Image (cartoon, coloured by chain):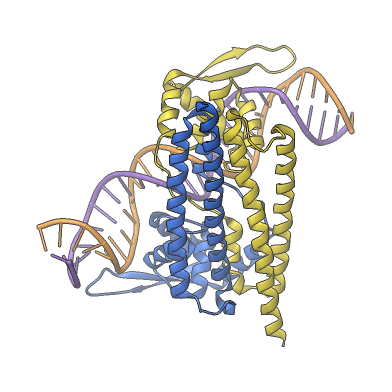
Chain colours: A blue, B yellow, C orange, D purple
Amino acid sequence: MALRYAVMGLLSGEEMSGYDLTQQFSMKVSHFWNAHHTQIYRELQKLEVEGLVSHRLIEQQDRPDKKLYKLTEPGMKELFTWLSEEPKPPKMKNESLLRVSLFHLIPPAQAIAFLEASRDTHAHILSMMDAFRGDYMSESQEPIAEKVGEYLTLDFGMRFMRSWMEWCDFAIGVFKRLEENQTS
Amino acid sequence: MALRYAVMGLLSGEEMSGYDLTQQFSMKVSHFWNAHHTQIYRELQKLEVEGLVSHRLIEQQDRPDKKLYKLTEPGMKELFTWLSEEPKPPKMKNESLLRVSLFHLIPPAQAIAFLEASRDTHAHILSMMDAFRGDYMSESQEPIAEKVGEYLTLDFGMRFMRSWMEWCDFAIGVFKRLEENQTS
DNA sequence: TCGGTCATGTAATGGGTTACATGATTGA
DNA sequence: TCAATCATGTAACCCATTACATGACCGA
């Protein structure tokens, strides 16, 4: 039930096509939610049937026609209802942690290689987030009111990446000491 | 494709029933993966059809009979293949962050109330993790080899909770300053 | 000429959630 | 007496992923 609110949330600011929504997802939303374009198109159809969004057709010569979607009044109402709900405990799904939970089954050297590679991919994502923040946010420390949400979620994304990297280093240390104890 | 490996991973240590697996999931695995019992039973059937697990029936008088599942040789092989794959970037799905990304639409006071409640639920989870670690882990700093995975994933879980709580406080500060600027 | 972008989707499959069902035992 | 635990599952639905499809334009 959450994808629909992500879509409605993005449409609350401006009219967009399914394609635009897909772009926005990978740019602004991917550090806390991900969705395929196929899912977005299906969701838009369902939302339109329910009367929560509507569209107008834009005809184009050089490119395929597109449908610009906007949030309707009932859609806006539904979005606000959802925004007023109580917070829930997070539902975790992290494949890397699942792997690490079974690392007692593999040699420490392999565990270390995995953790080093994982730290590097997370470092890469962090640097992209940093660049993104530099481009799209104001230079001041405090965010402007219309972008608080974006600012804060990106900030958490960056905290998560740093926290993951620190943990990787900690875990690498643990496996290195385990390795030494085995060989000695 | 990850649930099957979570199930196979738990079965790699000892024979278990679907019910036992469900218990283990909520105890040891829930801070990085979650699954309903219905899903686990379905997955066990699929894994058995594929020859990756097998079961033997235990008849009981006072309780319903149960099926104890164990990992087969091909299952063990499949598990090791998966454990040797390259690390992937994480796929995030966090409903709270999705909500926060739209908090420019609601009054700062409501945002603050949400963040305070969220911080408290995370604090509660952290305290449960801490109690769990006290009960099931050795008192020494370094984990024993057979429990590294469990130790490290729990450690990350706790880091995540602390990081979330710190971020909540940071975000509350941002909204408080926003509130002051609006009223003044 | 080849791959990327713009723009839209369908179909098949697989993963996840919710509701419902059974029936004995045990502790509050 | 009531709820929880043990233990198993089916059915219906919804959400997510992957593969496939179209076709013009633009820059290397």
Name the quadrant containing residue A64: bottom left
Instruction: Give residue C23's position: percent from left, percent from top.
Output: 73, 20
Using the image as rendered, state which of residue B141 and residue A152 is in the foreground: B141
Q: Is residue D18 left or right of residue B184?
A: left
* Residue most extreme to the front: A184
Using the image as rendered, state which of residue A8 and residue B141 is in the foreground: B141
Quarter of the image containing the N terminus of chain B? top left
Quarter of the image containing the C terminus of chain B? bottom right
Q: Determine whether A49 is above or below B59 in the image.
A: below
Using the image as rendered, state which of residue B158 and residue B33 is in the foreground: B158
- Identify the residue shown where x is 56% and y is 65%: A155
* Residue most extreme to the bottom: B184
Using the image as rendered, state which of residue A176 and residue A59 is in the foreground: A176
**Is residue A83 at all visible to an observer of this figure?**
yes
Instruction: Give residue B73's position: percent from left, percent from top.
Output: 44, 18
**Is residue A25 at all visible to an observer of this figure?**
no
Name the quadrant containing residue A20: bottom left
